[in-house]
Amino acid sequence: MAAAALWFVAGLVLLALGGDSIVKGASGLAQRFGASPFIAGLLLVAFGTSLPELAVNARAAWTGHQALALGNAVGSNIANIGLTLGAAALAAPLFLRSRAVGPLLVWLLAMTAVTIGLGLDGVLSRNDGLLLLAGFVVMLAFLIVRGRREPAELQADIARFAETKQGLGLNLSRVVIAIVAMYFGAKWLVQSAPIVGLGLGMGPLVTGLLPVAIGTALPEMAAAVVAARRGQGDMVAGHVLGSSLFNLLVVLGGMAAFRPLPLPASFVQFELPAAFAFALVLFPMTRSQLEVSRREGMVLLVAFAAWLAWELVHLAA
């Protein structure tokens, strides 16, 4: 158990380092080959933080740990809103200028509801997976088109987020190092997580929901708190919503499109509805005003703690 815990932590560290390196490398390469800093920044804000989860879930699905991947995908969405967004808003109110936040949240609610409906028969089929992937393509097209209508000041902030050195050799090195780091990070995490979960009395699904999802969310939470204190509320909201949609549509959809994905009854009856509920709680916070306040951040953190307590009590029972 102790050795597995060390490998688990080492995997998390490598995933965090690899995720940061690939964001910088991909941004530099994209701009080197003609992408505008704004488009590069827009995509990095929305999906850059999801790459470590993608590496973990791809490794888990490939090696037959589908329940672990399921738990991580949906647990990450709950952690994104309850833990990451909650902690960031508690650190500093999140002022939102982006006109895309509302539509992205609506799309997250709609696609979560669709996933629940598709999973009522106990499996996500290949066609279900392709449908979710199509939902991601629709969202991506919307994001690019709508992004060009954002306020000029916000577009400039997003472009600055993507600024990095554009040397070809440097960024190729960053990407290669990131791929190696995430490969071994995902490998060590997936190998050790079931042992750690078993030592804590958890099955694969709950291991993915709790230790893996929370562990991979901690670097994102730290970055979100820093961004909130710098007044970058749109960056935080973009990370949270983009990452959540990526997990749902690309990770779950991709796994199902690759191979039909069995869904435990509890996953459809509680975990997915819990992810929907967290997104739904966020809806009035972003619709009634152009900020997520410290009080609302506390509400999200308390809700996350309540969900965590419920999972642990249910586990003990």
Image: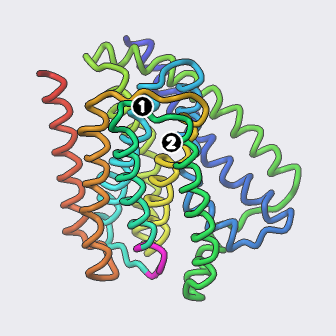
Magenta part, dominant SS: loop
Is 245 covered by the magenta stretch? no
Would you say 18 lies left or right of 4 here? right
Q: Which amino acid does label 2 sit on?
A: Asp
- Disc 2 + disc 1, Cβ < 8 Å: yes
Q: How many labels does the image show?
A: 2
Residue 106 sits above or below residue 122 on the image: below
Disc 2 element: helix
Percent of width and height locating residue 85: 35, 59
- The x, y position of residue 183, in whole percent, is 65, 29
User: Is residue 162 toward the left or the right of residue 276 in the image?
Assistant: right
Amino acid tagged 1: Val
The crowd level at tag 1 (other Cα within 10 Å; few <14, some 14-19, many 20+) is: some
Whichever of callouts 2 and 1 sits on the residue coming sooner in the sequence is 1
Residue 73 lies left or right of residue 173; in this view the side is left
Q: Classify 233 as above or below 183.
A: below
Query: Can residue 16 be seen in this snapshot?
Result: no
Using a 10 Å C-alpha cutoff, classify the residue at mark 2 as few (fewer than 14 neighbours), some (14 to 19) or many (20 or more).
many
Residue at (58% x, 45% y) in the render: 130
* Residue at the (34%, 82%) spot, across then down: 290
Which residue in the protein does label 1 denote? 123
The spot of residue 177 in percent (x, y) is 73, 38
Asked whether residue 305 is in view, the answer is yes
Residue at x 42%, y 27% (from the top left corner): 262
Please report the bounds of the magenta region as a residue range: 97-102
Separation (CA) of disc 2 from disc 1: 9 Å
Residue bearing mark 2 = 128
Specify the quadrant of the image occupied by residue 150.
bottom right
Q: Dividing the image into 4 quarters, which one contains the N terminus?
A: top left
